[in-house]
Amino acid sequence: MRRAFVAMILLGVVGLAGRAPAHDGHQHKVMGKVVTIDEKSITVEALDAKKVTGMLGADTKYMRDKTAVTRADVKIGERVVVVIVEEHESATVKQVLLGTGASPESKK
Amino acid sequence: MKSCCKLFVALLVLGTVAGVVALYALIQHGVSARDEPTAAEAFVARRVRHFAVPRAGRDAPNPVPPGPEVLARARAHFADHCASCHGNDGRGHTKMGQGLYPKAPDMTLTETQKLSDGEILYIIENGVRLTGMPAWGKAGAHDMTESWELVHFIRHLPKLTPDEIAEMESLNPKSREEFEEEEQMRRFLDGEDMKPSAGSAGHDH
């Protein structure tokens, strides 16, 4: 009982001694067409013509329908939905969802 | 008796100091859950949690043998009950998980993976006070098979495949807005022309 009491006080004191600012953790889904893509980042022109850039990483998942694909499968001009997580002032791409319809090249 | 009195006074002083610090912090920060726990707070909380789990529970082995069917059931269970806070991949990158104090942990990391099977089960069944983790177990219930299956799934989280995540996404509970958002994204990806206002399909805070 006494140990639990001391632990609770200790927890309160240590916990309130200092604070670190919270990170955002906001998640955006951007629909648009791929403008550029390389090893580090992808830029998408959203439907409102704004260009949105996110950082790609080893954790970025690429999906066409429900099948996993790779970065090499993402073509310039292709329709994508990019899931971006904003953390610590950086925009990291969590997922790139690719279209299941005809590719931009084949539509021409 | 004398030493007992000294201990009481020491505890009273410690309690008063803690109260003053708490009051100061409350005035400075309010009761916002936006802050991150300090490293010291996280350390102490983990130690307290460790000692709060009874030794017998901590050392309990998982009685459910692992297997693909067990993982499939646990995956569906996790997608339905746990993913709202923890995310399908267990990394806690969700609207609710990031809004909690402390934030939902990245369960693929060592801090969770080094817990014993019994400790993970205890947390699932009993929850953790002063966090967002509820007790999923029913009082007096003896069948904990579903929770033991979840323990296997939590062990599997670091090796989760994109296909498994995609399957889980179809099993996540969805609000009407989320359903409509998914439908909008699907139509866009299928080649349907969309209005510019739909450029950002979703913005989760």
Image: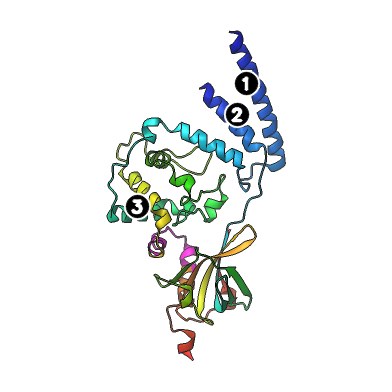
Q: Which residue is mark 2?
A: A9
- Does dot 2 land on a helix, a strand or a loop? helix
Amino acid type indicated by mark 2: Ile
Residue A81: say if magenta. no
| Residue B58 image label | none
The segment highlighted magenta reads B164-181
**How packed is label 1: few (under 14 Cα within 10 Å), some, or many (20 or more)?**
some
Task: Kindly report the secondary structure that dominates the magenta region of the rendered protein.
Answer: helix
Q: Which residue is mark 1?
A: B11
Task: Please give the name of the residue rendered at 55% of the width and 72% of the height, measured from the top-left corner.
Answer: A39
Q: Quadrant of residue A34?
A: bottom right
Q: Is residue B9 visible?
A: yes
> Share a chain, discs 3 and 2?
no
Chain letter, disc 3 residue: B
Residue type at tag 1: Leu
Compared to B144, does A64 lie above or below?
Answer: below
Secondary structure of the residue carrying numbered label 3: helix
Residue B173 painted magenta? yes
Pointers 2 and 1 in contact (C-beta within 8 Å):
yes
Residue at 67% across, 29% down: B19
Q: Nearer the viewer, residue B198 or B9?
A: B9
Q: How many angstroms separate mark 3 from mark 1 (CA)?
A: 46 Å
Image height check: is A37 above or below B28?
Answer: below
Q: Is residue B204 visible to us here?
A: no
User: Which residue is identified by label 3?
Assistant: B74
Q: Chain of mark 2?
A: A
The earlier-in-sequence mark between 3 and 1 is 1
Percent x, y for residue A91?
Answer: 60, 64
Q: Residues within 10 Å of mark 2 (few under 14, many from 20)?
A: some
